[in-house]
Image: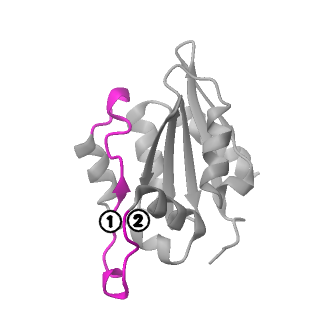
Amino acid sequence: MSRDTEDSVAVVVFREEGVWQSGLLPETVAEDLDGLVGVLRQQPGEHGAIGLVNVADEFFVAVRVRGEDVRLLLSDVTASVAWDLARQVVDRLGIPAPGDDDLEDVWPAGDLSMFADLGLDEMELGAVLADLDAYADEMLQAVARRVGFADVYDRAVEAAVH
C-alpha cells in the first residue's frame, strides 16, 4: 500500500510569543503517523503544534498535538484504501475502512473542531472539506487563511517546492 511521497508536503505550524511560525517536516512523516506525532511533540508552541500533510494533492491529514492530547483529521476516508498514512489515521480513529461500495463518496473523519479555539469552527471546516472540486493543497490553504497562518504556511510549502 505504500506510495511514493515525492509529491507530498509535510509542514509544522505553531505560535510562539504570539507569532505564527512554520517549517518543513521530514519527508518520512508523510507515511508514518507515529513519526509525525513524535516530531510534533518536539515543537514549541503556545497552543501545541499543528502538522499538515498534503499527500500528492489527493487528501490531507491534520494533526494537532498539545501535550498528551493528539487530535486527528483526515480529509478523505476513502484515501485509506490506497495510502499508508490515511490508513493509519483511520486505524487510530477506530473507524472502519471504506468498503468497495463506499469508494464513490468522499467524506472526512476525525476532529472537525480541532481548530475551533483558533477561530475555525466545525461548520466552517466542514464547508472547506465538502468542496469536492478543491484539491488538498487548496483545502489546506483555506484552513491556513481562516486560522491566520497562511503567510508562514505558504513560505514552508514554497521551500518544499524549490
Give the secondary structure at mark 1.
Answer: loop
Residue 117 magenta = yes
Neighbourhood count class around disc 1 (C-alpha, 10 Å): few under 14, some 14–19, many 20 upward: some
Q: Residue at x 38, y 39 (%)?
A: 114
Q: Identity of the amino acid at label 2?
A: Asp
The residue stretch that appears in magenta: 95-121
Viewer-closest of 11 and 109: 109
Q: Position of residue 84 (x, y in %)?
A: 59, 68
Q: Main secondary structure of the magenta part?
A: loop
Query: Which badge, 2 or 1, is on the more N-terminal residue?
Result: 2
Give the secondary structure at mark 2.
Answer: loop
Q: Identity of the amino acid at label 1?
A: Trp
Farthest residue to the left: give it.
123
Q: Quadrant of residue 23?
A: top right
Farthest residue to the top: give it.
17
The correct choice, above or below, for 88 with respect to 161 in the image is below
Q: Position of residue 89 (x, y in %)?
A: 49, 59
Which part of the image, by quadrant, shows the N terminus? Answer: bottom right
Q: Quadrant of residue 30?
A: bottom right
Residue under label 2:
76
